[in-house]
Image: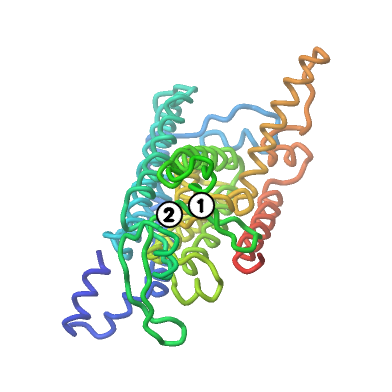
Amino acid sequence: MLYYLFQFLDAHDLFPGAGLFQYLSFRAALAVVLSLIVSVGTGGYIIRRLRRLQVGETVRDLGLAGQKQKEGTPTMGGIIIILAILVPAVLFAQLDNVYVVMMIVATVWMGIIGFRDDYLKVVKKDKAGLSARAKVAGQIGLGLIVAITMLVSEDVVVRYDLEEAQDAGYEIVRTVTSRDADGQDVEYAHVKRTLTTVPFLKGNELDYGRVLGFLGDNADELAWLIFVPLVVVVVTAVSNAANLTDGIDGLAAGVSAIIGVTLLVFAYVSGNSVASEYLGIMFLPQTGELVVFAACLVGACLGFLWYNGFPAQVFMGDTGSLTLGGIIAALAIALRKEILIPLMCGIFLIENLSVVIQVSYFKYTKRKYGEGRRVFLMSPLHHHYQRKGIHESKIVIRFWLVAILFAVLSVVTLKVR
């Protein structure tokens, strides 16, 4: 909202320096600062309120060091994260931008699902919480919202050279004139294509329509047959993986902040015509505004660590973890980086795989030998290291370092092909 106010003030020379609000970098910096202030400023009040309402975590005794001391720690702290994302996003982002609207919807949507699950568990004392079927239905719903927005909205386009787009027969939504790196006016086409990025490969673009090339001329029109199920799977998988990662103090919030920085970099270069041309990547008009939203995500996660770092004063609960996973998935899809998720969200993937491997191996050995055997001392993986006697603070820091490594490798894909 402030973006439009300062745009008006600048247009009428009513406030010196109002033009600063036109710069993404300035608004992103303000978004980080405000999200930190909101999370830290409201966190104390929300935690006290949760304590008064006796919204505390019920801890199952799994034999882990320091586990029972966490009994009664307030949960549903994801409310802090959601507030710290939405408040600066509404104030500093362009609210008529289709990507920003989609991200706000994703945040609220997953926040409601997570809140409902936590509410049933800690307030209604229903240990099962929201049924798995209802939770997956909510995740599928968000996947459909994201997929349909990407397919239908005429603001979700890729920029191409006009002649190239015409020769290839692409669906041209509009044409625009812009200056290239040499200062020459060049006419470009904004086209609708179900493109994504394939990391580490030269000419690293994949059109889902081309995968169905055997269908002939109808391939492009039927690209949704691949795109929609893929988006649903990505949203469901990432939100569940973030939920599994939220097992020890500060882990999910810290890893999400690192992933958020990575997505911020991708949003900046993908939404900047000069940077995208230099790097030889897709220029995605209007995605630059996602820099502001990603900045809100990073600031909210870092601010939440003020209270969630060991020893945690509050847990994010499903309200936070499902929301963070949904946001990360939606951002990656909007930036055409969904295939990069296994690398970018490497910690989430490892945590998820550790559970799959543990359960699968246990069932297999029980059928074969009559008793179940385990690969890890406990899953998810962070509990395995706890069982080995490593303090959870050290586990979290090491996982953060690995997440930074994955983040660097993800950014490197912009140039290494």
Q: Earlier in the sequence, mark 1 or mark 2?
A: 2
Q: Are marks 1 and 2 in contact (CB under 8 Å)?
A: yes
**Of helix, strand and loop, which one carries label 1?**
strand
Give the residue number, with chain letter if any, for mark 2.
193
Pinpoint residue 365: horizontal percent, then vertical percent. Answer: 79, 20
User: Which residue is at the far top?
Assistant: 370
Mark drawn on residue 380: none
Residue type at mark 1 is Asp
The quadrant of the picture occupied by the C terminus is: bottom right
Pinpoint residue 123: horizontal percent, then vertical percent. Answer: 40, 28
Pinpoint residue 193: horizontal percent, then vertical percent. Answer: 43, 54
Q: Mark 1 and mark 2: span between their CA atoms?
A: 7 Å
Q: Residue at x 55, y 53 (%)?
A: 206
Q: Residue at x 38, y 46 (%)?
A: 106
Does residue 172 appear in this view? yes
Residue type at mark 2 is Arg
Give the residue number, with chain letter if any, for mark 1.
207
**Of helix, strand and loop, which one carries label 2?**
loop
Residue 24 lies left or right of residue 212; in this view the side is: left
* Of the pair 210 and 105, the residue shown nearer to us: 210
Does residue 320 appear in this view? no
Numbered-mark total: 2
Q: Is residue 273 above or below residue 154?
A: below
